[in-house]
Image: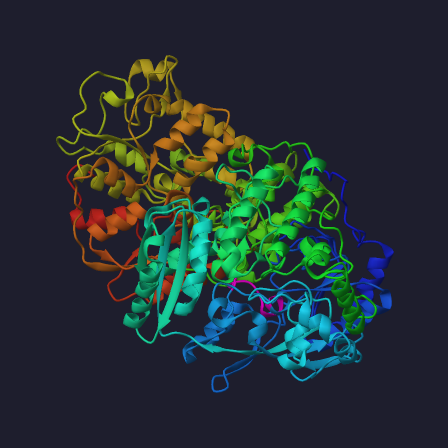
Amino acid sequence: MAATGAGAGASPGAGGGSGAGAELDVALRRVVRGEVGFDPASRALTTMDASNYRRVPLGVVAPRDADDVAAVLEVCRTHGVPVVARGGGTSIAGQATGTGVVLDFTRHMNRLVSLDPGARTAVVQPGLVLDRLQEAAAPYGLRFGPDPSTHSRCTLGGMIGNNSCGPHSVAWGTTADSVAGLSVRTARGERLRLGREWAGAPDGLRALVEGETARLRTTFPELPRRISGYALDALLPEHGADVARSFCGSEGTLGILTEAVVRLVEAPRARALAVLGHADESAAAEAAAGLLPLGPLTVEGMAADLVPDPSGLPRGGAWLFVETGGESHGEARARAEAVVRAAGAETAGSLVVTDPAARRALWRMREDAAGTATRMPDGSEAWPGWEDCAVPPARLGAYLREFRGLLTAHGLRGTPYGHFGEGCVHVRIDFDLLTAAGVGRFRRFSEELADLVVAHGGSLSGEHGDGQARAELLPRMYGAGTVALFERVKAVWDPDDLLNPGMLVRPAPLDANLRFAVLPRRPVDVAFGYPADGGDFAAAVRRCVGVAKCRTASAADAAVMCPSFRATGEEEHSTRGRARLLHEMLAGELVTDGWRSTEVRDALDLCLSCKGCRSDCPVGVDMATYKAEFLHHHWAGRRRPAAHYAMGWLPVWLRWAARTGAVPVLNALASVRPLAALAKRAGGLAAERDIPRLARRTFSRWWRTRRPPAGSGSGSGPIPDLGLAPAPIPAPLVVLWPDTFTEYLSPEVGRAAVRVLEAAGLRVTLPPTLRLPRGALADGRTRTPAALLAARRGRVCCGLTYVSTGQLDRARRVMRRTLDLMAPVLAGTAPVVVLEPSCAAALRTDLPELLHDDPRAAGLAARVVTFAEALERHAPGWRPPVLDRPVAGQTHCHQHAVLGDAADRRLRTAAGLTGELSGGCCGLAGNFGFEDGHYEISAACAEDRLLPGVREAPEGAVVLADGFSCRTQLEQLAGVRGRHLAEVLAQALESRPREGDG
């Protein structure tokens, strides 16, 4: 059924389609050269950041330059409409949301203007992503000091607005410490260049501050991580009257940043990481302050609750990650070992890591905590809100003990982690923000925690700013007089209260505008089971907390998520953007037509269903499943796009072609360009694509006619594991799954797999094709008169093509038929070997989640193994032939996301296939790259990692591609033949066909 909004908690300004919004839209389009978006999709994408809050803007503008910014400010001032500056939208406290016009700086004002290695400075625009600056500075041995965990997608403008820090602030301070000068537009259009000695100060600021110097010297706590409020003490003469520094952390409430001059620092030539185990986070926190005199680059803490697999870590219930630097690897290691010695008996264990890949893996564990922490160990939800309080480092251990006590007193749970060396703690807490009682508890806890932080001499915010989450409580930290001074300062800069109102001064209540309030209270009627979310689609959509790991410009290491965003750079094509649109569809306020929404459909259209987000998203958002769910409802009772019939029903068409003997004719017709063009147009396929050739002989037909090698046990006749005879099993039996691609398009992969599996001493059989009334089945080659008279014929199918096109009713029918056929296999113990990664992933995940009410589905899912897993688990003594050749290619995205490739890596190593496969997605992704309108994006995805990796491969490299889509993409875009690992090993085993193979 179509979802509708709950109605409660609707944000003001939602009526962007009203006359006022339309008038503002027209006025902005007249004067702005960048994009202006007042449509529901543009607005929906910016209703939330990474906080608990939601505000619906009137519109979104992507300015091209500072003149566009000035034009927006003038129009909005005339219309009395607020303006909110937004970078990567990863703010935790709600300050990147607003009800007026949102300025999106990531689209155009995202350049590195200049970099001066001699002066160690860079000039940047506000939308520049931090990692791009780091990449430009690295060749000169330089870097920008602060580095939040969101460094791959947060922007310099957002960092300046929040005065961001990151783990290396122990060595290099906060963003404010790295700012040399700022170019700012005030709300009334004045252009200011902010710097030291009152440079750029607006009229009245100096006189106001000089009249309050006594207050500024006594009410601002001395903390390395004091981010709360305005940094007015930076304007004291002893601090250089630094207007630029005082502007940092103002959260877009004083002016709009258009350009910044930032300082760079010298990066250590070498680094090492000491990992210290402690009994709990309080013990780790107490130890952290004692390590600071050793001059580490970082002192990070993390409790065991956040570590799914601590096998690579020292013993302990919490850990300190202490990074050291040096001119050489030896010097860095020596400093790390000195840290271990200094920690001494206080630790439960220690580890020193110098290998860059191992260090990255450990740091990734820490960086993912911002998302991982949104789920408690039992899977229940946890939320930000008290994300980054800071206390003096020496008091952190005591503070954490009292913090834990406060959680217990309120019946709450949370997992602290963060920058222990600077007394800054991140935590997500399992607040109930869905009910009035839960929201009431949220408020009471917030008030008591604020008092606890202040009692320890701390700051309500130690990194992410106050926003709406904490600004209401600033009087508890600073007192009413200083907060009143903040309001007077705001009035000097922004007398019309145009810029980000409701933040820092005169704030909205901390329990207003909660983003969950608009979601439906009753579960939405859906097809998938969503087992990790209690069957609730709204809970599944709530998984996205906005940390935006999907917005990275390049796939890190072996990661996949999110290929369409990397191809377009558009928020709506990121996992987060699509989740936001689904959220608004459920709310029903902006996106009002539920499952029929064209905004959601268009955003999901470029989702490749690569499943990368299922593993790469810190909270496991599964957009491929959400897309299939949406398409199922969106097209229910309506004629679907032609490609859904052409590609979704591919198993039916290919089976028909094979049975009727039409394959030669179809191949011949496909080679005639005009006829092929007509067929592609009729089927909704991309004109740029070649139609793959069908195999003249299917894999199953080869199987039925081959003569198995003597003693292999493969072939026709009784199969004890299927319950057809009591004879002992001479060798382990495996059931080889004849997926659609192997069966009709790449039977050579199946033949190769059979050769290798049999060479490894395994007996191979295919799934049954006959279903008898009493459950006695034959395998793919058995023919008996009784079976033919009483049985129903069929072929197993994972249902992948139906799922990916959202034809879920058809998918369920196909899957149930498959389970009926596989009944005797499930009654035995034989593993099911699936050669096509996308089909294996569908059987492992889509099958049990779509047939969540059928226990057989989980049984089959548990039986599925990959080719490499089958050899490793069921032929552990077998050794593959050694090729001693390098490899190139790409790990299949579904294998990365669902199946894992550890067994494949070990098999390649044993076979002497050296080197690493790239990450990312090939871009063809089953039906996606074949559909009309997707070719350019499909090719761009291939150019992200796959094609460059193959072009740069060493001479003689084996190009591996286990997926049919990957092999097709390589062939059509690069003219390269990729091979399944089974083909490579089979070729090495024997150079000519074996007798009986035909």
Q: Of 162 and 556, which appears nearest the observer?
A: 162
Residue 961: % across, % down: 34, 52
Q: Can residue 331 be seen at all in this image of the molecule?
A: yes
Residue 831: % across, % down: 30, 31
Report the magenta residues as a range: 148-159
* Residue 153 in magenta stretch: yes
**Residue at (39, 39) in percent of width and height:** 840
Q: Splitting the image into 4 quarters, where does residue 441 fall?
A: top right
Residue 420: % across, % down: 48, 58
**Residue at (70, 70) in percent of width and height:** 34
User: Viewed as shown, does residue 759 lie left or right of 808?
Assistant: left
Residue with the most extreme bottom position: 118
Q: Is residue 659 above or below residue 273?
A: above
User: Viewed as shown, does residue 664 lie left or right of 187?
Assistant: left
Q: Of 739 and 419, which appears nearest the observer?
A: 419
Residue 35: % across, % down: 70, 66
| Applied colour scheme | rainbow
* Residue 839 in magenta stretch: no
Q: Of 910 and 678, which appears nearest the observer?
A: 910
Q: Is residue 176 above or below residue 379?
A: below
User: Viewed as shown, does residue 933 lie left or right of 944?
Assistant: right
Looking at the rendering, in which quadrant would you find the C terminus?
top left
Looking at the rendering, in which quadrant would you find the N terminus?
top right
Examine the residues drawn in magenta and state their main secondary structure: loop
Residue with the most extreme left position: 710
**Residue at (68, 69) in percent of width and height:** 218
Q: Is residue 254 above or below residue 758?
A: below
Q: Can residue 149 be seen at all in this image of the molecule?
A: no
User: How many badges with numbers are in the image?
Assistant: 0
